Amino acid sequence: MLPEAVMQQASEEMLDWRGTGMSVMEMSHRGPEYTEIATQAEADLRDLLGISDDYAVLFLQGGASSQFSMIPLNFLQEKTAADYVNTGAWSSKAIKEAQRFCQVNVVADAKASKFTCIPPLHEWQVNQDAAYLHYTPNETIHGVEFHDIPQVSSATLVADMSSTLLSRPIDVNRFGLIYAGAQKNIGPAGLCIVIVRRDLIGKTLPGTPTMFDYQIHDKNDSMYNTPATYSWYLAGLVFQWLKQQGGLQAMAEINSRKAAKLYAAIDGSDFYANPVEKSSRSWMNIPFTLVNSELDKTFLQMSAAAGLLTLKGHRDLGGMRASIYNAMPEAGVDRLIDFMMEFERRFG
Amino acid sequence: MLPEAVMQQASEEMLDWRGTGMSVMEMSHRGPEYTEIATQAEADLRDLLGISDDYAVLFLQGGASSQFSMIPLNFLQEKTAADYVNTGAWSSKAIKEAQRFCQVNVVADAKASKFTCIPPLHEWQVNQDAAYLHYTPNETIHGVEFHDIPQVSSATLVADMSSTLLSRPIDVNRFGLIYAGAQKNIGPAGLCIVIVRRDLIGKTLPGTPTMFDYQIHDKNDSMYNTPATYSWYLAGLVFQWLKQQGGLQAMAEINSRKAAKLYAAIDGSDFYANPVEKSSRSWMNIPFTLVNSELDKTFLQMSAAAGLLTLKGHRDLGGMRASIYNAMPEAGVDRLIDFMMEFERRFG
């Protein structure tokens, strides 16, 4: 989902970008028009997140799944082990891929709780010889979110922020690397944003494909090869829209209010349930179940008929899931809650 | 450049794809609407090129530049060497990247001719122990094109068709793998199409990132991770447009006619020149120079003012270059020729 205002603007500019007679899709990525678009998008993202020049901001392809390999290939350097925190489906995937390249220490694992909580920091078995510590601040499928950056002294922090980046302000300086597949909270599929501290890059493992070398992309302003130009442009429109909304502090207030409303509706009812420990509940992805799961299908049919789309839970978990990213207006959450209450009155 | 009819359709469908109330950009890649779009695009491409089920058709990210690594990582298997033909800037890049993974035999090299010809087949030093033979049927920058598939008995043929795929019919069965960055002759940037014989995949080198394993993408119908959904959709619109034009035989006739006209205009004048040997001239990319290069700047300014955009030659070569892909109508080539003749009358 993209903000309606962004879709409208993209639609208006589609055949003719600002009187050039060209679509953004048809521009050369090295031409002056596209360079302006790309540069502005990076500047706006740096502005929104307060990113200093110590960090490269990269607009890459290949999704978070490519990052699962790129991180060990770039960050292991002389070391042979890395620390990973397992809080759900996405951390599990990152761990599995990293195991192809190094010894992975799972320093904390929420699997026993069926990924309904974040293991407390004092229980983490952090290793001094780890090249970095990887965690997933928001688990899209399980609806678990870190609301603070873990204070680990030892290692470079690496975070998969695919479904939370830009939902609130963050202190980028606490991280060695942040990455985010754009298709959750930023914009279109086919773009992955990487924010990486420049002093950490440039020493890849032997046999690393050139396209998996962060420094190559940094030195070429993400144009070592043709980037995903249209997705980059759309992400830029989203960044401008976020600035118009008042920036990330304003978004954090809206997002926390949206989530609080929906959790209150779930918790205030015996008809709906959310299994996640309260302090670890996601602002972005809210899985919930009907106490009587035989009603699931009816709920999904009726909600779709009411224009509330894609509420089906992930196939691994079943039930329902509301993804209420930045682009979801507060009124959309209100409509969902109204529908849920009405459904409960009828079937509860 | 995309066909005007495709841009128009994409623009009309942008905010609401066929009454669903959703933009294609906002669809889940696993939902029924997007599955229909993706499946249809693959079926249409198979139809256009006559691709059998012995071949996987993959819609990947990362451009041709990622293929430069993926090919050796997937195709070397037990072997340690590969054959490459060097006919210009793009083959040179493929060679440089392959050298990270294996011994590269440059079996034929047109560098001494400044890449103005294709070395004759009988001079190629093909090796029996090579895992595959890689060549670049069309060199975008140098304007050199193979008009026949080289008849080499020994090795699996691998071809970078980034700037020629869909310009004419090809016999896919002659190849082990064909790849094409979509942004030249297919559609939008951010998509790379790979056509690969299924019996050749599944044995990657140790340490290959999962995202660089063709078989993973084949088994998951190019949805191991979120693909570049909008670019895939646009490519699908282009495939449908090509079928409406009469398919690739019809495109070949138009393309050969467009190119013949422009070369005739260049050759018929003492004012313009194209350095490429006649039998190796590209249908798609036609570099040309003004005999008096002091007029280059004036030519580019006046052509841009006349609405003939992006005629500037590649920075490595200078001069001018006309890229006349499928999406360039014959009338566009006529306009360019008219402009060139008028410019010659005025400044010649």
Image (cartoon, coloured by chain):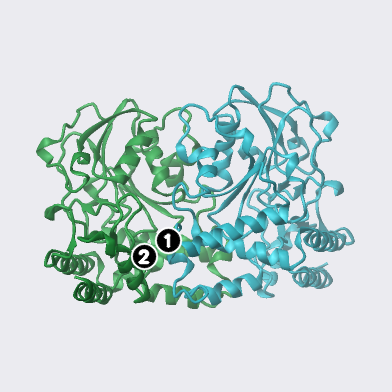
Chain colours: A green, B cyan
Image check: A274 left or right of A160? left
The quarter in which the C terminus of chain B is drawn is bottom right
- The answer to which image quadrant residue B323 occupies is bottom right
Q: Amino acid at mark 1?
A: Ser
Tell me the distance, in whole angstroms, between the alpha carbons under discs 2 and 1: 8 Å
Front residue of A16 and B169? B169
Q: Quadrant of residue A212?
A: top left
Question: Which residue is at 79% across, 29% downward?
Answer: B153
Residue A310 - label: 2
Contact between labelled residues 1 and 2, with CB atoms less than 8 Å apart: yes
Q: Residue at x 78, y 69 (%)?
A: B330
Near mark 2 (Cα within 10 A), the count class, few <14, some 14-19 or many ≥20, is some
Return the residue at label 1.
B28
The reply, left or right, for residue A41 in relation to residue A336 is: right
Across and down, in percent, residue B89 comes to 66, 43
Percent across and percent down for residue B242 are: 71, 64
